[in-house]
Amino acid sequence: MSTLRQITRRPRSAMRAFLRSEAAGGILLMGAAALAMLIANSPLAWTYFHVLHLETGPVLTPKLGPMTVHLWINDGLMAVFFLLVGLEIKREFLDGHLSSWADRRLPFIAAAAGMAVPALVYLGVTGGAPDLTRGWAIPAATDIAFALGLLALLGKRAPTSLKLFLTTVAIVDDVGAVAIIALFYTAALSWTALGLALLVLGGMFGMNRAGVKHPLWYFAAFALLWYFMLLSGVHATVAGVLAALAVPIVNTPGAPDDEDSTLHRMEHGLHPWVAFGIVPLFGFANAGVALGGDVAPFAPLPLAIALGLFLGKQAGVFGSVWLAVILKLATRPSKASWPQVYGVALLCGIGFTMSLFIGGLAFPAAPKADAVKIGVLMGSLLSAMAGVAVLRFAGRAQ
């Protein structure tokens, strides 16, 4: 089936497709990351790193220099990933599990604490060292694909309410991560380019108001918005979330997605390409790090990231959920026991994709870039193993 037909065909249930594709994509992501680590520590290492840094395009902006394979993946394809993230955020807020304040309360509380506490752990471990402070946001993000992939492997040991809870926390987490990227990892601005980007975004909202529904118009405008954002100094991937805000949606509460909803059609069309292509490719391109080099695993930077993900995430998410329930601000996910909630809080410490992405913005050059990868891998692996172990033996609520 052609890409155009996939994007424009009649959609099915967004949440069911989301959970299926994210879980399967997460399993593929694990394999891609493991393969990258194997190759980076094998005789093929030189070829791996050489291909990633091959110049494959023009100089789109002096800030980046000639485009390479790595830049096309991180600054180009990941903008499509963020477009899908933006579509999911908008759908959940207007037509999904975050459409009411009662539904939003617990995920908002958990996500906010789950971003703040890891950042504090990171700053505490690094001791406020000026050359490391810029990385405070690295352990703040959750990798939804990786976490849902592990939940899928557990089958019926994890109730549906926990999967929805993890999904909604990660979506709110993504909102925070995008805000962090825009506010704290933006270079000197080109106001001319930023003005042109805002004009394109205004044109997209104008198309929405005028009743334009065909997805290809919005994809074309998104590509133009991405280019101007790249020139502006704001990280180009932010264009994905901004573009998603302008895409029309037809609300379908309690029913299958509307075939006339541009947002649902774009979301369903993009899901397989992102889950099975872009995210695993990003993992493969960014997880490879040569072990036994100049970076010590227990140096302040990798240790701060690992502890932020493993200790900070579980403390922030589980602690905030427990307090919210005790204070009667929210209710515990249905049919889930406290040990199961704790297991999911551990899985929130899998920061792989977003943590590597933010780490690349904070510390783009070696040896700190390699230290970031080691810290993210250590923290994510610890969180994954501990979370799976807890959920494997935790009983359901009676």
Image: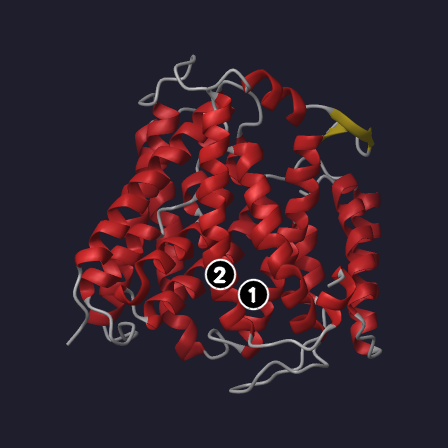
Is 152 positioned to the left or the right of 272 in the image?
left
What residue does disc 1 label? 89
| Amino acid on which disc 2 is placed | Ile
The CA span between labels 2 and 1 is: 6 Å
Residue 78 in the image: x percent, y percent? 64, 46
Q: Locate the C terminus by quadrant.
A: bottom left
Q: Which residue is mark 2?
A: 171
- Residue nearest the observer in this picture, 155 or 243: 155
Image height of 300 relative to 385, above or below = above
Q: Amino acid at mark 1?
A: Ile
Q: Is residue 34 left or right of residue 235?
A: left
State how the image is colored.
Answer: secondary structure
In the image, taking residue 348 as reference, residue 370 lies left or right, namely right
Which residue is the extreme one toward the front? 1
Check disc 1: other Cα within 10 Å, few if <14, some if 14-19, many if 20+: many
Query: Which residue does the image show at 23% across and 64% down from the upper left?
Result: 323
- Give whichever of 9, 380 is nearer the camera: 9
Q: Residue at x 78, y 64 (%)?
A: 4
Label 2, secondary structure: give it. helix
| Quarter of the figure with the N terminus | bottom right
Q: Which mark is residue 51?
A: none
Decide: few, some or many residues near mark 2? Use Cα within 10 Å; few <14, some 14-19, many ≥20: many
Rendered location of residue 277, percent (x, y): 61, 48
Instruction: Residue 242: tell me if it is visible.
Output: yes
* 166 and 391: which is toward the camera: 391
Query: Is label 1 in a helix, a strand or a loop?
Result: helix
Residue 10: x and y in percent read 69, 78
The quarter of the displayed image where residue 374 is located: top left
**Circle 2/circle 1 CB separation < 8 Å:** yes
